[in-house]
Image (tube, rainbow, N blue to C red):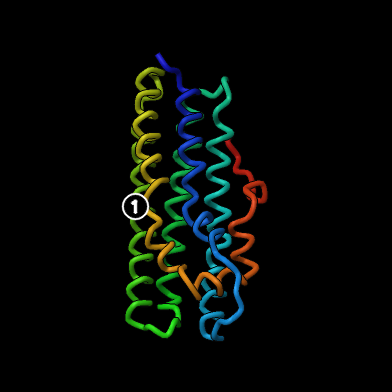
Amino acid sequence: MEGTNPVNKKLAAALSGGAVLAMALSACSSGDDNSEKLDAWAKEVCSAVQPQAKKIEAANTAIQKQTSDNSTPKDVQKTDSQAFQDMAEAYKAIGAAVQKAGAPDTGDAKNAEKKQQDAVKELNTLAASYASLQKQVDDLNTKDQAKFADGLKDIATALDKLSTSGNDALRTLEEGDVGKAMAQQESCKSASGAPSAAPSATTG
């Protein structure tokens, strides 16, 4: 029977691929033929994204730290629950920022608006998914290690799916000139930077 810790390590591994926005931003290529309006849009979005990307990174770090052999199911539950809550809030905030910024000025208003709305929808779906995972973690039986490990396994599987899907609309939004404008923003560069820059969350 697999104990809690190997399963929580799987959870951490699944999460490492799940910093959707940080990954999407790091894919931006640099360029300098952008309109002032597009630069202003990129600045607004990137400034809003940066603290949220750090929050997501910190949640990842917290879960990864809670994989030591002396972690109790209660410790793991508390850390994972808080991490999923933080992620849900972060993706919701990023979605709100993209919504508030409006469609980027790419010269094709209708297409840009569709891309923007798709990205907002995707971010809100991600937020709801992490909120759902938090509820699942909160409902786990911490008194029975075997049942707890089985429950974590299901959550790790769900996380795995989340980390491999769910950022197509974001990538589409950041194609072409939008990506170039975002790549020039210092806040976007740091948002997609090394995880070590993230503040480490306390795990109790």
> Is residue 131 or residue 105 the one in the foreground?
105
Q: Position of residue 35 (x, y in %)?
A: 54, 85
Q: Is residue 107 above or below residue 62?
A: below
Q: Position of residue 131 (x, y in %)?
A: 37, 48
> Is residue 184 or residue 100 the one in the foreground?
184
- From the image, tell me which residue sits under label 1: 128
Q: Quick check: 109 left or right of 51?
A: left
Quarter of the rendering occupied by the N terminus: top left
Within 10 angstroms of label 1, few (less than 14), some, or many (20 or more) residues?
some
Q: Position of residue 36 (x, y in %)?
A: 56, 86
Q: Quadrant of residue 163?
A: top left
Q: Is residue 71 above or below residue 124?
A: above
Residue 63 visible, this angle:
yes
| Residue beneath the point at 52% across and 69% down | 179
Q: Quadrant of residue 68?
A: top right
> Is residue 102 or residue 181 the one in the foreground?
181
Residue with the most extreme top position: 1
| Residue beneath the point at 40% across and 56% down | 167
Q: How many marks?
A: 1
Q: Quadrant of residue 184?
A: bottom right
SS for tag 1?
helix
| Residue beneath the point at 55% across and 28% down | 67
For badge 1, the amino acid type reads: Ala
Q: Position of residue 116 (x, y in %)?
A: 38, 71
| Residue beneath the point at 35% across and 59% down | 122
Residue 97 visible, this angle:
no
Q: Is residue 174 above or below residue 38?
A: above
Quarter of the rendering occupied by the C terminus: top right
